Image: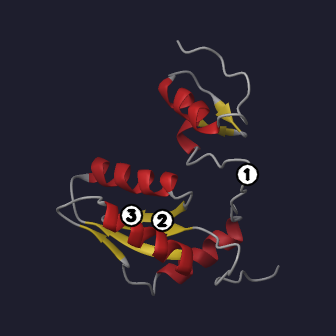
Amino acid sequence: MPAPIENIAANPLQALKLLQQTSLPCTLAGLTTPQVRRVVPSSKQAMTPNKKQLRQLKSMCHELTPVVRIGQKGVTEALLAEFDIALSYHELIKIKVGVGDREERRAIISKLAADHDALVIQQLGQIAVLFKRNHEKPHIVFAKK
């Protein structure tokens, strides 16, 4: 069993990996291990949408077409560069992963989201929708209460 984590804020990615490796029910910020999608470095706080904002994002994603398509070659450097550009500009993007089985697609989408500090809004089959707030030039305006 790994050593206990002294300070989660010092290295949140290592803390998440340790939590995922253990079979014990662990918590991080009030979430159990299967619910933890990503850990945000303390230098830049990512926006976590509430339920109303999630509904708005899901309704917005219906009209989107996939901006990034992952095909036979998988995830390449060129694809990562385009993905980063599209995510930073549009904030909400739809991607299509046309390789592998269900678990492989889920792993690719989770890795892309974690590497780019994005939130997976929805995943249905080969299609996934990711969101990352652009703090300099936000394009998406959420409805007031």
SS for dot 2: strand
For the C terminus, the image quarter is: bottom right
**Residue placed under numbered mark 2 in the picture:** 122
**Marks 1 and 2 in Cβ contact (< 8 Å):** no
Does 31 appear above or below 67?
above
Does 95 appear above or below 100?
below
Q: Earlier in the sequence, mark 1 or mark 3?
A: 1
Q: Position of residue 116 (x, y in %)?
A: 52, 58
Q: Position of residue 70 (x, y in %)?
A: 27, 66
Badge 2 density bin: few <14, some 14–19, many ≥20, Cα 10 Å: some
**Type of residue at label 1?**
Ser
**Type of residue at label 3?**
Leu
Q: Quadrant of residue 29?
A: top right
Q: Earlier in the sequence, mark 3 or mark 2?
A: 3
**133 or 84, nearer to the observer:** 84
**Residue placed under numbered mark 1 in the picture:** 43
The tag on residue 80 is 3
Question: Residue at image x 42%, y 74%?
Answer: 94
